[in-house]
Amino acid sequence: MTSTPASAATSPASPAASPGRPSPSLISTLPGRYYTDPEIFRQEQERLFESMWFCAVRSADLARPGAFRTVRVGRESVLVTRTRTGALRAFLNVCRHRGARLCTEEAGEVRRNLQCPYHAWTYDLDGKLIAAPNLVRMPDVDRAEYGLVGVALREWLGYAWVCLADEPPSFEETVTDAAVERLGDVAAVERYGTQDLALGKRLSYDVRANWKLILENFMECYHCATIHPELTDVLPEFADGYAAQYYVGHGAAFGEEVRGFTVDGSEGFGRLPEVADDQDRRYYAITVKPTVFINLVPDHVILHRMFPLAADRTAVECDWLYAPEVVESGADVSKSVELFHRVNVQDFEACERTQPAMASRAYRRGGVLVPTEHHLGAFHEWLTGMLGGRDGRSPHRRRLDEPAGGAHP
């Protein structure tokens, strides 16, 4: 180890540390406490996860009437069921009698009804109260009124999206418009026919990091040349540091010698039937705030769903989706799965290395974004606006050309 010269130890570490030397190349990030403070996480649960549309389950996971799945949405457990008519319904997973959790398993299937294991209050798959001990002696009880509390549900891309808000925001303006914002046209994502694809592989990750670190990582590629050798071999332009999401409508091109979106660049599968010629041999990435990543390549789709559990812990479920005939034939999908699995592991390890520093005094005022990351600033503005920052801007966030004096609150 070499020693650090005294002069270097006393000089400013970066332009951000010297108010007299602002650098227009850099803009400030959120302060570190946005990634550690339980109160900020509680506000995010209330104003984001429990108020916006949340991608809960893949519709095909509930294949038959009576199938159910429970998912964590903010602070709530949500129960999604397939009714006898084939529709999907969502409810708060709470018995209306004494508040016991109705379904304690993550997934399962019932023959006809949902029954509380505490006092046997029983509901049909549409949420109506249909039976309870001594209920016939209480003719004044309105069985519809004391049914399960419903949750708004929409299906898109083959997934059930739920919203806990009493008055859900426009699905088009807050979900499908993410495709328009990224690709310029919602049809550009719908051409992949995601709702008709089959699940080839699902992997779950327990990431010891704040959900925003994961989202920010997904949205930028300044790190790609450093930690993603397999990905930059397939998508060489990523080595330049510009993420696909930096440009509207742009898809990163495969390398000249690359034959497929696989870990070694080998042949993948046939192009999905509706994918346009100008989308062939390209990778597109879409972020649907706050918790969904959509990755589009010519022969399959990769979809990430985040489930924020705490300020420093996030569950991520990742689905690899292929044409039904690929999955039904038993084709080996391991090379395409392995590519993005490695990307996931590399990204999540980077986020876990970053999380402890969010509580450091060195990050008390936050860090900086270089020009290829400036689009992350728009996410920070959106977030602070959703949390009540004035004019969409956190009162504690500063530009690098603003004085940094004074104690940080």
Image (cartoon, grey):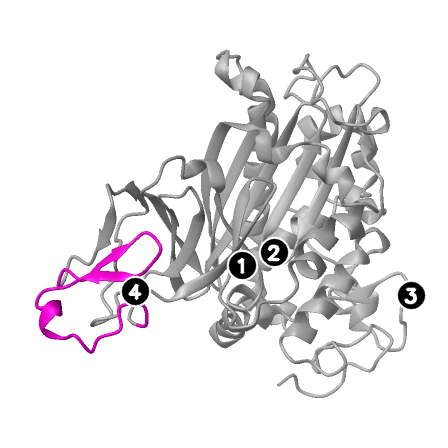
- Distance of mark 2 from mark 1, alpha carbons? 6 Å
Horizontal and vertical percent position of residue 311: 49, 64
Horizontal and vertical percent position of residue 86: 42, 41
Answer few, some or many: residues within 10 Å of disc 4's Cα (few below 14, many 20 plus, some between 14 and 19): some
Which callout, 1 or 4, points at the residue further toward the start of the chain? 4
> What residue does disc 2 label?
213
Q: Quadrant of residue 10?
A: bottom right
> What residue does disc 1 label?
210
Q: Residue furthest front?
A: 139
Which callout, 1 or 3, points at the residue further toward the start of the chain? 3
* Marks 2 and 1 close (CB-CB < 8 Å): yes
> What residue does disc 3 label?
24
Q: Quadrant of residue 4?
A: bottom right
What residue do we see at 79% from left, 41% from top?
244
Q: Nearer the viewer, residue 89 or 297?
A: 89
Q: Depth-wise, is mark 1 or mark 3 nearer the camera?
A: 1
Q: Depth-wise, is mark 4 or mark 2 nearer the camera?
A: 4
Range drawn in magenta: 119-145
Task: Indicate whether 247 appears above or below 311.
Answer: above
Which callout, 4 or 3, points at the residue further toward the start of the chain? 3
Does the segment drawn in magenta span residue 181? no
Give the SS element for disc 4: loop
Give the SS element for disc 3: loop
